[in-house]
Structures are given as C-alpha cells and as structure tokens.
C-alpha cells in the first residue's frame, strides 16, 4: 500500500488511454479467469470483490457484517457486471462495467487533489503511476 495524491482528471485520463486501460483490464481479467474459459464465473469474480474488503471495513477498521447482507451485495454487483444475464462475465462486460465504475470514481473525486491509501495493484494506483510517468517524460 502507498499514500498517493490524485484527482478525477488522473482517473479520467487513465480510462481514456485505451492502450493502458485495456491492457490492465485484460491482465486483471486473465488473472481472475482461473479456469481459462474466457468468462468470469460468480465464484471467480467473488474473490476479487472480497479482496477489495470495501464492505468488511469502515475507514480501515474491520467490522462484522451480516453474511446474508454481504451475499446480497456481492450478488447485486455480479448482476451489474453480467450485462447479458447469462451467468458469466465476458471480457467486454468486465471492461464496460469497470470503465463505468472508474468514471464514476473520477466524477466523485472532482478537481481537487485527494490523498488516498491505494493497494499496489489497484486500478487507481495504476492511474497514478501512469500520470507520474507522463509528468516525468
């Protein structure tokens, strides 16, 4: 983890860089697709949702959540990714929904820089690294 400074334009610029964004999407999808069938099953994408620990922590402190409530949240997230409701998420669905979520984050961050603690392999960390490379070039 590292503490980084970013704003909405950092995230937006990353999403708009199709080569960088699509490369990261493809890599993340490939890592999640453990059976290599070209689709993400509920169990494959559930591991990613759970690893984010968004619902299991409150400002970095572990909190006990109702397991049924967590299951409902994860089910709802999966439905958001599975656009054609076939029970699996393909690469295009994964890319589209991740892009939508990243753009929502960019919009929420706005124009003022914010300090955030970021996981090393997160999409936001990759956006910050890309911005830093652009500035150093």
Image (cartoon, rainbow, N blue to C red):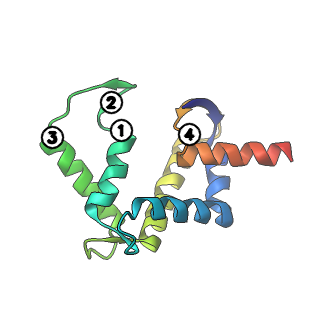
In depth, the one of 60 and 13 nearer the eye is 60
Is 121 displayed left or right of 40 in the figure?
Answer: right
Q: Which mark is residue 67?
A: 3
Q: Earlier in the sequence, mark 4 or mark 3?
A: 3
Q: Marks 4 and 3, Cα distance to the nearest angstrom?
A: 28 Å
Pointers 2 and 3 in contact (C-beta within 8 Å): no
Q: Which mark is residue 120?
A: 4
Q: Quadrant of the N terminus?
A: top right
> Closer to us: mark 4 or mark 1?
4
Pointers 4 and 3 in contact (C-beta within 8 Å): no
Query: Quadrant of the rendered structure where residue 23 is?
Result: bottom right
Is 136 displayed left or right of 31 in the figure?
Answer: right
- Residue at point 65%, 54% (across, down): 14
Q: Earlier in the sequence, mark 3 or mark 1?
A: 1
Q: Earlier in the sequence, mark 4 or mark 1?
A: 1
Residue 119 versus residue 31 in the image, above or below: above
- Residue at point 34%, 58% (across, down): 45
Q: Marks 4 and 1, Cα distance to the nearest angstrom?
A: 16 Å
Pointers 2 and 1 in contact (C-beta within 8 Å): yes
Name the residue that disc number 1 marks: 54
Q: Earlier in the sequence, mark 2 or mark 3?
A: 2
Query: Quadrant of the rendered structure where residue 93 is?
Result: bottom left
Q: Marks 2 and 3, Cα distance to the nearest angstrom?
A: 14 Å
- Residue at point 31%, 76% (across, down): 84
* Horizontal and vertical percent position of residue 61: 34, 23
Name the residue that disc number 2 marks: 57
The residue at the far top in this view is 61
Packing grade of label 3 (10 A; few <14, some 14-19, many >=20) is: few
């Amino acid at each position: 983890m590292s503490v980084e400074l970013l704003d909405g334009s950092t995230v937006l610029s990353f999403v708009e860089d199709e080569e960088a964004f699509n490369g990261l999407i493809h890599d993340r999808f490939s890592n999640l697709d453990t059976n290599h069938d070209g689709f993400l099953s509920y169990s494959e994408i559930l591991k990613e949702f759970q690893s984010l620990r968004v619902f299991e922590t409150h400002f970095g402190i572990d909190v006990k959540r109702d397991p049924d409530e967590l299951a409902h949240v994860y089910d709802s997230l999966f439905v958001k990714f599975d656009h054609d409701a076939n029970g699996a998420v393909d690469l295009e669905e994964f890319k589209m929904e991740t892009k939508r979520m990243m753009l929502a984050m960019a919009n929420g961050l706005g124009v003022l820089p914010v300090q955030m603690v970021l996981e090393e392999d997160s999409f936001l960390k990759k956006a910050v690294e890309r911005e830093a490379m652009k500035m150093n070039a």
